Image (cartoon, helix red, strand yellow):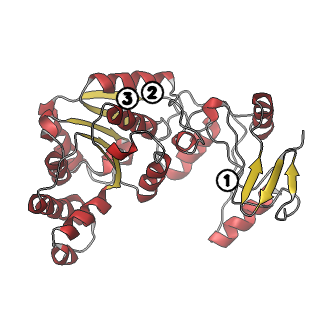
């Protein structure tokens, strides 16, 4: 079997034995590939895309064994959100249990370390709620994550019911529509601004516009958004509010950007609502070696339970983006 090993070769939809070659790179391990060149049996480079006949399951499994013999299949949000055709979301047993408990409880808080699949079940919860005909607001702290999820859900049958937003982009949009941009410009973007003034001004905008509420709220990366003023904002835009509405907060307590007092204040605010709590422990993203090394370097405690064994992990340090690309190129060669 001829198999091109491309820089940035990626494996997507690992749970369903799918493997794809990154179409943005036209360079093999040894030499450049020209437009129209045959890079493997049935695979040709056309512009910036790799055109190929659908591989057989046996060929896919063989390719996976060649590329990553050290890593067991582990589902990731990237795998789900970049599959070619819509499929049922495949979860680990732990994620399935958490997803079922979320379905049984209208208000839940799911906690887990990095790599435990929190975003996967957050997306699944939004999909299932939309399947019930509910308008769902999916919020997250990271702009790139919001764009990635929005793109991945574009072909979902109920995508019109799922509004995926970067929370601060939503705030800014509503504030602008309400004619409050001048007020927004008066504040400096310090941590207190994002924790308090920004959501307060958003609330003012929502009231001015009489904004329609969403039927359900799913918040990923919620550890960076659980302040009293953000909770006021969520309460206002959710049908029946936080007390009686349907919401699911997914978070990593170890990556909270605010101090303990703010976190305790938010927990005290939610406690009388009696949300159901759930925890994820198994790492379904990294090998044990990668998770251990990443924890040492970052100082963030990554989950090790359930992580498969892999090859030894080496650190490569670089001083600039250009230096990083050069060293990556040298490693691949």
- Mark 2–mark 1 distance (CA, rounded to whole Å): 31 Å
Q: Which mark is residue 315?
A: 1
Front in this rendered view, residue 26 or 332: 26
Using the image as rendered, state which of residue 171 and residue 255 is in the foreground. 171
Instruction: Report the mark closest to the observer, 3 or 2.
Output: 2
Q: Quadrant of the C terminus?
A: bottom right
Location of residue 267 with respect to 99 vertically, above or below: below
Residue 233, percent from left and from top: 17, 52
Q: Position of residue 108 (x, y in %)?
A: 27, 31
Foreground residue, 321 or 262? 321
Q: At 34% from the left edge and 54% from the top edge, which residue is drawn? A: 165
Q: Is residue 293 visible?
A: yes
For mark 1, give the secondary structure.
Answer: loop
| Whole-number angstrom distance, CA of label 3 to CA of label 2 | 10 Å
Q: Answer above or below: position of 99 versus 324.
A: above
The disc, 2 or 1, on the residue closer to the chain's N-terminal end is 2
Give the secondary structure at mark 3. Answer: strand
Question: Which label's residue is closer to the chain start, 1 or 3?
Answer: 3
Residue at image x 76%, y 34%? 60
Nearest to the eye among marks 2 and 1: give it: 2
Point 69% across, 34% down: residue: 71
Q: Which mark is residue 49?
A: none
> Residue tagged by mark 3?
279
Q: Which residue is mark 2?
A: 95
Using residue 129 as the reference point, say whether residue 119 is left or right of it.
right
């Amino acid at each position: 079997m001829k198999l091109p090993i491309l820089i940035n070769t990626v494996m997507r939809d690992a749970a369903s034995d799918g493997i794809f070659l990154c179409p943005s790179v036209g360079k093999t391990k040894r030499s450049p590939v020209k437009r129209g060149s045959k890079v493997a049996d049935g695979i040709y480079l056309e512009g910036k895309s790799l055109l190929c006949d659908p591989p057989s399951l046996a060929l896919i499994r063989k390719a996976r064994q060649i590329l990553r013999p050290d890593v067991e299949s582990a589902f990731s949000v990237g795998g789900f959100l970049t599959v070619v055709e819509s499929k049922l979301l495949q979860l680990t047993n732990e994620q399935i249990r958490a997803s079922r408990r979320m379905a049984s409880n209208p208000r839940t808080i799911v906690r887990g370390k990095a790599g435990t699949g929190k975003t996967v079940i957050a997306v699944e919860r939004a999909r299932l709620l939309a399947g019930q005909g509910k308008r769902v607001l999916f919020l997250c702290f990271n702009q790139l994550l919001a764009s990635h999820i929005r793109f991945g859900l574009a072909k979902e049958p109920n995508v019109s019911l799922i509004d995926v937003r970067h929370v601060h982009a939503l705030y800014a949009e509503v504030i602008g529509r309400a004619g409050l941009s001048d007020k927004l410009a008066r504040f400096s973007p310090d941590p207190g601004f994002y924790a308090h003034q920004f959501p307060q001004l958003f609330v003012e905008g929502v009231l001015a516009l009489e904004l329609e509420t969403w039927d359900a709220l799913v918040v990923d990366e919620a550890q960076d958004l659980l302040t009293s003023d953000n909770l006021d904002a969520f309460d206002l835009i959710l049908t029946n509010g936080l007390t009686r509405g349907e919401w699911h907060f997914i978070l990593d307590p170890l990556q909270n950007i605010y101090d303990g007092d703010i976190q305790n204040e938010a927990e005290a605010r939610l406690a009388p609502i009696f949300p159901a709590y759930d925890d994820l422990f198994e790492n379904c993203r990294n090998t044990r070696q990668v998770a251990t090394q990443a924890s040492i370097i970052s100082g963030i405690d990554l989950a090790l339970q359930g992580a498969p064994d892999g090859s030894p992990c080496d650190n490569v340090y670089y001083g600039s983006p250009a230096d990083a690309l050069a060293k990556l190129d040298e490693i691949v060669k």
